[in-house]
């Protein structure tokens, strides 16, 4: 079977994108004890904290928001099963990123060999 470098690049990109997505999802699941929100609320909180951080004298207010989330997270506690699932997803994401990088490298080597 003859696979072109372009095909390898596309498969490598898809593998890397899937791996990154799994890694992000896994990191969020793994850190479930650190934020008391759902994913959408977490994204909104992250946006608000970042916005406050870049505003003049906003670092103090951003830290206040983080400490409030910390206290709420302590009340919620950790779901260890969810954390372990997150760890597994994170490592699967790393593995897919490694496959994507290997495919991109193979495509690059093949492309170089074709042009000699």
Image (cartoon, rainbow, N blue to C red):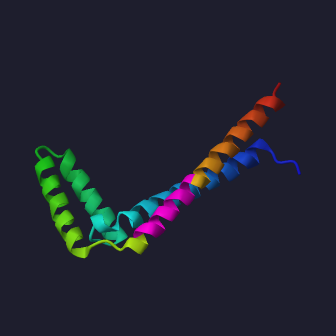
Horizontal side, residue 17 vs residue 106: left or right? left
- Residue range (magenta): 83-94
Residue located 55% across and 53% down the image? 94
Q: Residue furthest top?
A: 116
**Picture quadrant where residue 6 is located:** top right
Q: Is residue 23 left or right of residue 76?
A: right
The quadrant holding residue 24 is: bottom left
113 in relation to 14, above or below? above
Q: Is residue 10 above or below residue 35?
A: above
- Could you say where residue 21 lies in the image, as x and y percent from the top left? 51, 59
Q: In this view, which residue lies farthest toward the right?
A: 1
Q: Position of residue 92 (x, y in %)?
A: 56, 59
Q: Is residue 103 magenta?
A: no
Which SS does the magenta portion mostly show? helix
Q: Residue at x 29, y 71 (%)?
A: 37
- Tell me the quarter of the image containing the C terminus: top right
Q: Position of residue 95 (x, y in %)?
A: 59, 54
Q: Answer left or right for 81 relative to 51.
A: right
Q: Nearer the viewer, residue 76 or 42?
A: 76
At x 65%, y 50%, the residue is: 99
Residue 52 image point, x, y percent: 18, 52
Which quadrant of the figure has residue 14? Answer: bottom right
Residue at 52% from the left image edge and 55% from the top image edge = 20
In depth, the one of 95 and 21 nearer the eye is 95
Which of these two is toward me, 92 or 64? 92
Count of picture labels? 0
Q: Is residue 79 left or right of residue 61?
A: right
């Amino acid at each position: 079977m003859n696979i072109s470098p372009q095909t390898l690049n596309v498969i490598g990109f898809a593998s890397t994108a899937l791996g990154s997505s799994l890694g992000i999802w896994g990191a969020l699941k793994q850190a479930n004890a650190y934020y008391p929100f759902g994913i959408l609320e977490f994204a909104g909180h992250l946006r608000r904290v970042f916005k406050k951080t870049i505003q003049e004298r906003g670092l103090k207010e951003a830290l206040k928001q983080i400490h409030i989330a910390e206290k709420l997270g302590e009340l919620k506690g950790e779901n260890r099963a969810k954390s372990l699932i997150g760890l597994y997803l994170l490592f699967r994401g790393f593995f897919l990123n490694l496959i994507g990088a290997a495919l991109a490298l193979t495509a690059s080597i093949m492309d170089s060999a074709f042009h000699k």
